[in-house]
Image (cartoon, helix red, strand yellow):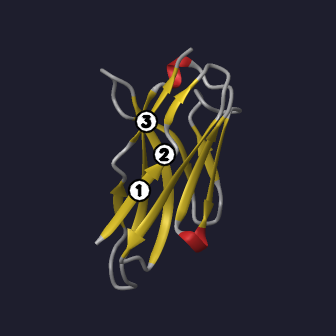
């Protein structure tokens, strides 16, 4: 079994910064892409950023220039740093990872349970 556990959410003032972490554990042979999504109340879940196993990153326009996604492959962990936070960044942030448990298995996308980020003064 595989688990993804996020941490680092909380209440931040506008203009502040936040660093989210997501650690994968369990039966892991290899991890391909990892990413962050977010869902605001009454809205659909949307992409924030993704990063390949080789470190190539992709960002949503809404966070481009303010966010940095990174990963530590030795710790099966992905990070999301967001600067200059705005009230519209308020959402539950979810990480995901494409993981296979053995060389004979296909990659499966796993999701974390989500962490709340609230940007408010």
- The Cα–Cα distance between marks 2 and 1, rounded to whole angstroms, is 12 Å
Residue 84 lies, with reference to residue 67, above or below; the image says: above
Specify the quadrant that holds the N terminus. Answer: bottom left
Which residue is at the front of the view, 11 or 94? 11
Dot 2 and dot 1 residues touching (CB under 8 Å): no
Dot 1 lies on which element? strand
From the image, tell me which residue sits under label 1: 5
- In the shown orientation, is residue 37 left or right of residue 73? left
Residue 53 lies, with reference to residue 118, above or below; the image says: below
- The Cα–Cα distance between marks 2 and 3, rounded to whole angstroms, is 7 Å
**What is the quadrant of residue 73 in the picture?**
bottom right
Question: Tag 1 or tag 2, which sits nearer the N-term?
Answer: 1
Disc 3 versus disc 1: nearer the observer: 1
Q: Residues within 10 Å of mark 1 (few under 14, many from 20)?
A: some
Looking at the image, which residue is at 48% across and 49% down? 7
What label does residue 36 carry, if any? 2
Looking at the image, which residue is at 71% across and 33% down? 65
From the image, tell me which residue sits under label 3: 38
Residue 34 lies, with reference to residue 92, above or below; the image says: below
Residue with the most extreme right position: 65
Dot 2 and dot 3 residues touching (CB under 8 Å): yes
Specify the quadrant that holds the C terminus. Answer: top right
Question: Percent x, y for residue 28?
Answer: 41, 76
Disc 2 versus disc 1: nearer the observer: 1
Question: Percent x, y for residue 21?
Answer: 53, 52
Question: Percent x, y for residue 67?
Answer: 65, 38
């Amino acid at each position: 079994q595989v688990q993804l556990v996020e941490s680092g959410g909380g209440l931040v003032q506008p203009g502040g910064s936040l660093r989210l972490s997501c650690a994968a554990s369990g039966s892991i042979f290899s991890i391909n892409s990892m990413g962050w999504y977010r869902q605001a109340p009454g809205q659909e879940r949307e992409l924030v950023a993704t990063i390949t196993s080789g470190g190539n990153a992709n960002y949503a326009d809404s966070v481009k220039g303010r966010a940095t996604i990174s990963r530590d492959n030795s710790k099966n962990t992905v990070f999301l740093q967001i600067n200059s936070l705005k009230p519209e960044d308020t959402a539950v942030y979810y990480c995901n990872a494409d993981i296979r448990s053995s060389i004979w298995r296909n990659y499966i996308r796993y999701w974390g349970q989500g962490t709340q980020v609230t940007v408010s003064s």
